[in-house]
Image (cartoon, grey):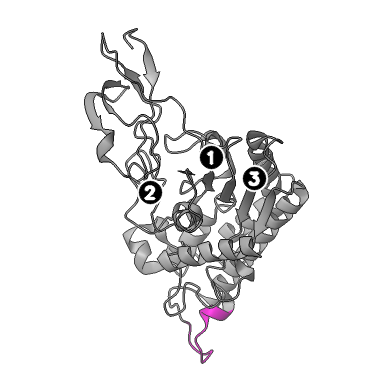
Amino acid sequence: MADGNVHTAWIYFSNASGHQCEPRVTQHVLVSSPAVNAAMAIDFTSYTYMHWAPVFLNFDVTYPSGYEGDTPPTSSPHAAYVAMGDSFSSGEGNPPFEMGTDTSYNQCHRSSASYPRLFQEDMEFDSMSFVACSGATTGDVRNGKDSEVSQLDALSEETEVVTITIGGNDIKFKDFATTCVFGGPFDQCDDESDVYEESWDIMTNSSRGDYLPDALTELFQDIADKLTTNNGAVRVYVMGYPYVLTGLSYLSDSLLEPRCDYLTLGEAMAAEAIVEKLDSVISTAVSNFMDYRFQYVDPTDSPGHFAGTEICTVDGYFNGIDEGLIDQAYTFHPNANGQLAYKEVLTDFISQ
């Protein structure tokens, strides 16, 4: 390509099971952006990274004068399994994170310990597109986040299975969780707090522009449109959120002392109520959407997976204050055991 034009390039790696995504050749291109003007040489044959990774998203690439070689594709490849959504799907809180998702401009924090990665290994899909991004809202799924394009772009008529967790960031659950853990005695998250009331209002006040049920319905329609009516065999598994904390799990076996000295019983009960309401809103949205391809998966209705594993329990499945001191974003997210439990919830649901 010697036309001197500027093209936006994607660069992909083959995955560890041997499924390869073109181009798999050595490229030498000049990269130009407001902040970057550099040359790079990448030998794609030396990589066996576990996902198709866009290295330079939205970067303008100018090919050298006289260049006649292959060029990277300008859109993401299609995959049999597409893992979409927010931090509960990306594997937030379980470093190290996959290449390109833990940088100054990209904090999607996709982890090899995430339930989508574990699910892919179990199901042995021919190809996977892992586009979930920590912090994503319904709008971010549609429009892109952290320099990445819309997650919807990964969907096609070839898609067989989709998983997604979404809604938690729409109701500002991160603000709620951060206040619970790091707010101090005068900045709590109980059911009289501002952060609790804001989260609740987004889920219940239909006059709001960010009313969650409407946002979910719009997103489900966008996903359905991408899949088209011709793809009737596809299944979209909309995953609910497990209880991170409950009033009962907060109390010790003696019921006299709390398990978490940095939380109050009122905060624990508020956290339980928020997740219960959020899951109810998501489940109702899936049901009301009336598309048989969309199925709600309830992680709170799976005995043996998340029961008794809340944040304050011994060997709990969620990151608490210790992990939050490393990075506050890790707090209240499933750890490696929690992600494994998520995967088991999903596989149990599918096998029913």
Instruction: Relative to 196, say whether 268 is above or below.
Output: below
**Residue 344: where, in percent of width, then height?**
53, 66
| Location of the N terminus (image quadrant) | top left
**Which of the 4 image quarters holds residue 42?**
top left
User: Over which residues does the magenta segment extend?
Assistant: 248-258
| Residue 17 numbered mark, or none | 2
Instruction: Relative to 148, say whether 34 is above or below.
Output: above
**Which of the 4 image quarters holds residue 225?**
top right
**Residue 64: where, in percent of width, then height?**
26, 13
Q: Residue at x 43, y 68 (%)?
A: 337
Q: Which SS class for mark 3?
A: loop
**Residue 65: where, in percent of width, then height?**
26, 9
Q: Which SS class for mark 2?
A: loop
Q: Is residue 12 left or right of residue 193?
A: left
Q: CA distance from mark 3 to mark 1?
A: 23 Å
Q: Which SS class for mark 1?
A: helix
Q: CA distance from mark 2 to mark 3?
A: 23 Å
| Amino acid type assigned to the residue bearing label 2 in the image | Ser
Q: Residues within 10 Å of mark 2 (few under 14, many from 20)?
A: few
